[in-house]
Image (tube, grey):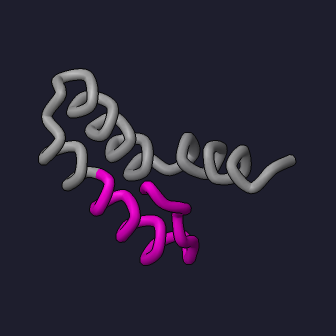
Amino acid sequence: MSDMSDESKAARDCPACAALLGQVDKAAREYDRSAETDARVRLRRHARAEHGRELPLPW
């Protein structure tokens, strides 16, 4: 299993990750690049603080 699938599974199992990914997707669908970037930053900070993982860029 690749690292990306492990991260995807962890994201689905964590309510905060799932909510933040939802914000990223919503902002992307609405072409709100500022909100998308903000959500990606919050997701990266959450992953680092709560899961001890650094998400690969462009996250």
Q: Main secondary structure of the magenta part?
A: helix
Outermost residue toward the right in this view:
1
Identify which residue is drawn at 43% across, 50% down.
17
Identify which residue is drawn at 68% across, 49% down.
4
Magenta part of the protein: which range?
40-59
Location of the C terminus by quadrant is bottom left
Question: In which quadrant of the rendered view does residue 52 lie?
Answer: bottom right
Q: Is 56 one of the magenta-colored residues?
A: yes
Question: In which quadrant of the rendered view does residue 12 lie?
Answer: top right
Identify which residue is drawn at 30% across, 40% down.
24
Answer with left or right where residue 33 lies relative to residue 25.
Answer: left
Total tally of numbered discs in the picture: 0
Identify which residue is drawn at 33% across, 31% down.
25
Q: Position of residue 57 (x, y in %)?
A: 48, 60
Q: Position of residue 28 (x, y in %)?
A: 27, 31
Q: Is 9 one of the magenta-colored residues?
A: no
Relative height, residue 34 to residue 46 (above, below): above
Q: Position of residue 33 (x, y in %)?
A: 17, 41
Relative height, residue 7 to residue 53 (above, below): above
Answer with left or right where residue 54 lies relative to residue 22.
Answer: right
Relative height, residue 44 to residue 18 (above, below): below
